[in-house]
Each structure stands twice: as C-alpha cells, then as structure tokens.
Amino acid sequence: MGSVKNLTVLEQLGSNKTGSGIFTFSDRYSVFDWGEMPDHIKDKGKILCLTGAFFFEKLDEMGIPSHYTGLIEGERCVKTTSLEKASNRMKVKLLRVLKRRGLV
C-alpha cells in the first residue's frame, strides 16, 4: 500500500455493510520523492500503530466514532489497555467515503 503500512482485507465492503481489514504498520520509511529507503527503523511500525490506537481510543471515549476496532494480538482484537506487548497490526472497519460537492 505504501511506505508506512499495508492493508489486508478480511471482509469486503458491501453496498449495505461495512467490511473489515488489518493495517500492518511497517518499519519502512521513505524520503520525499526518493521513495523507500533501503534500511528500516526498528519498531517504527509498532510505535506508529500504538500511537494511532491511543488517539482513536481517546476519540471513542469522547463519543467520536471512527473506523478503529482494536489492535491484533495473536488471534485476539484488543484495546491498548489489554495489550500484553506492542503490536504493529490494527483492525479497522472498511467504510465507503462519500464526497461532498464543493469540498473534495
């Protein structure tokens, strides 16, 4: 998908239902127009995943919905408070994004 994360589709998005997928955050990085660099930054993927999860969970606590479902630990999908070790995999809902005229 890109230099930061890959998307694995678990369940396709339907016309009347959400799908689901897993973002896997990588240790890869890119620099401007040069593209992907040959080396990696150790644990970058885990840190980005945990940071994103933390803020999605804060939004949820405030009553603001998102596509975030939880973090993947083994076969379980858990919130950060139940995570036993750092994860670089985040489960998300796949949603249809509607364009609003004049805004996009």
Image (cartoon, rainbow, N blue to C red):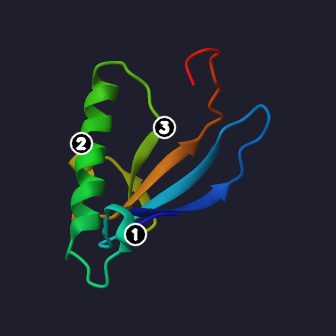
Question: Pointer 2: what residue?
Answer: 54
Where residue 87 sits in the image (x, y, percent)?
Answer: 30, 64
Where residue 63 sits in the image (x, y, percent)?
Answer: 36, 18
Out of 50 and 98, give the one closest to the viewer: 98
Picture residue at 38% right of the left edge, 21% below the top? 64
Compared to residue 72, the image places residue 68 above or below, namely above
Q: Amino acid at mark 2?
A: Phe
Would you say 55 lies left or right of 24 here? left
Q: Earlier in the sequence, mark 3 or mark 1?
A: 3
Label at residue 67: 3
Compared to residue 24, the image places residue 41 above or below, namely below
| Closer mark to the observer between disc 2 and disc 1 | 2
How much space separates mark 2 and mark 1, taking CA atoms? 19 Å
Compared to residue 35, the image places residue 32 above or below, namely above
Q: Residue furthest right?
A: 15
Question: Pointer 1: what residue?
Answer: 74
Q: Secondary structure at mark 3?
A: loop
Would you say 74 lies left or right of 101 here? left
How much space separates mark 3 and mark 1, taking CA atoms? 21 Å
